[in-house]
Image (cartoon, grey):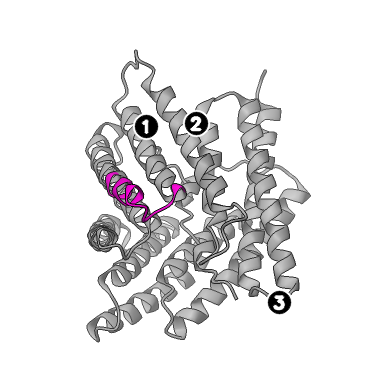
């Protein structure tokens, strides 16, 4: 039975860090056309997220190391619930339930850490996830019920402490050859995200963007050293190049100003080439050893890189259609494996979630383009 761990990867790419977009803003700004197919997709997406959440939570209760999956699926579950519910009160009620789970999650990791059965990264991730869930609740709760609303800044500081600790531990283990590049990247992005939450003013984001770029430059250099020594493959090298180009683009956008040498266009092209290479290398038929490649995350990276190349609506739609095709093919593959008893239901559900998400994005983009003045 193949592991599902690499199939469940960071979902943070759904929210653009450059703009600092939160779940709350996404829900508030979301176009909700009267479309039965869109409503059906949202229900299926929610159902798939619930299956995956239940599976990883059971694994957590059984003592398995699934802190990454718990954190990711809690966010996806909240996102999917928000798309289904129409009132803030309903979202707040669900957030309360999620917060209770995250409190339990943090306590169990603290106990493991105190008993020396867990590491600092796992505890940091649990602390980060709990603070994030409490912030969601405070932002969603009606003002008269949110007695602790002013505590959001302190929760963000807790997120910052957790993200800093997680990044430090992740980088140490990566340098020692015991960590994946995905985790290094994810922790740096979490650190960037919370830095931006603390300083939401776009003019004050440059220091945070600069620090993220510095981290990604170090990540690329370390990966290049391993690649040159034939300890890593082209997929890992391409990912490090992608991460550095992305960070450099974000910093240039944050700084603003003129771009006489057209450096942004060159960086965006390199980012897209790196994303495409990583996808093709990681999903090639020769990939038959070890865990499954994280196709959802890889495809989203490719999608975002293609969309960054041009604001042209037709190219934006073409990128979304390609992403949906990739996710549809993966769902078919996972369905066949499930029918043959080769994977668990949560692996199939993760593929179904990704396909529904891709279909929703495409339908929303098509509806937006249809109603925009020509």
Q: Residue at x 44, y 73 (%)?
A: 66
Left or right for 90, reference 129 = right
Which residue sits furthest front? Answer: 229
The mark that comes first in sequence, 3 or 2, is 2
Pointer 2 residue: 308
Left or right for 121, reference 369 = left
Tell me whether circle 1 and circle 2 mark residues in contact (CB < 8 Å).
yes
Magenta span has 228?
yes
Magenta span has 253?
no
Q: Residue at x 63, y 75 (%)?
A: 344
- What is the CA distance from the residue labelled 3 to the residue labelled 2? 40 Å
Q: Residue at x 56, y 76 (%)?
A: 55
Mark in front: 3 vs 2: 3
Quarter where residue 40 is shown: bottom right
Quarter where residue 337 is shown: bottom right
Pointer 3 residue: 341
Q: Nearer the viewer, residue 322 or 3?
A: 3
Look at the numbered disc 2 and give the secondary structure of its residue: helix
The mark that comes first in sequence, 1 or 3, is 1
Q: Which residues are magenta?
A: 221-234
């Amino acid at each position: 039975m193949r592991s599902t761990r690499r199939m469940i990867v960071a979902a943070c790419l759904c929210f653009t860090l450059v703009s600092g977009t939160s779940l709350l803003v996404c829900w508030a700004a979301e176009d909700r056309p009267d479309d039965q197919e869109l409503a059906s997709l949202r229900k299926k997406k929610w159902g798939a997220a619930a299956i995956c959440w239940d599976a990883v939570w059971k694994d957590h209760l059984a003592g398995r190391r699934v802190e990454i999956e718990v954190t990711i699926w809690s966010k996806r579950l909240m996102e999917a619930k928000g798309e289904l519910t129409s009132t803030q009160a309903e979202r707040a009620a669900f957030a309360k339930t999620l917060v209770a789970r995250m409190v339990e999650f943090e306590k169990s990791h603290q106990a493991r850490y105190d008993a020396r059965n867990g590491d600092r990264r796992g505890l940091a991730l649990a602390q980060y996830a709990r603070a994030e869930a409490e912030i969601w609740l405070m932002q969603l709760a009606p003002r008269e019920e949110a007695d602790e609303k002013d505590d959001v800044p302190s929760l963000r500081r807790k997120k910052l402490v957790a993200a800093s600790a997680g990044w430090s531990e992740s980088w140490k283990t990566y340098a020692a050859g015991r960590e994946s590049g995905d985790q290094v990247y994810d922790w740096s992005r979490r650190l960037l995200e919370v830095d931006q939450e603390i300083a939401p003013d776009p003019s004050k984001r440059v220091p945070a963007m600069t620090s993220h770029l510095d981290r990604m430059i170090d990540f690329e250099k370390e990966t290049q050293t391993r690649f040159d020594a034939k300890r890593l493959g082209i997929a890992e090298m391409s990912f490090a190049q992608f991460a550095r180009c992305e960070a450099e683009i974000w910093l240039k956008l944050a700084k603003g100003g003129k771009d006489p040498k057209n450096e942004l266009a060159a960086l965006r092209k390199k980012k897209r080439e790196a994303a495409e290479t990583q996808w093709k290398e990681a999903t090639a038929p020769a990939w038959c050893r070890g865990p499954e490649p994280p196709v959802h995350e890889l495809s989203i990276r490719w999608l975002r890189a293609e969309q960054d190349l041009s604001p042209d609506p037709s190219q934006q739609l073409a990128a979304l259609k390609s992403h949906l095709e990739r996710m549809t093919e993966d769902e078919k593959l996972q369905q066949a494996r499930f029918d043959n008893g080769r994977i668990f239901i949560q692996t199939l559900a993760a593929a179904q979630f990704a396909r529904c998400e891709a279909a929703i994005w495409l339908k929303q983009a098509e509806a937006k383009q249809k109603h925009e003045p020509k």
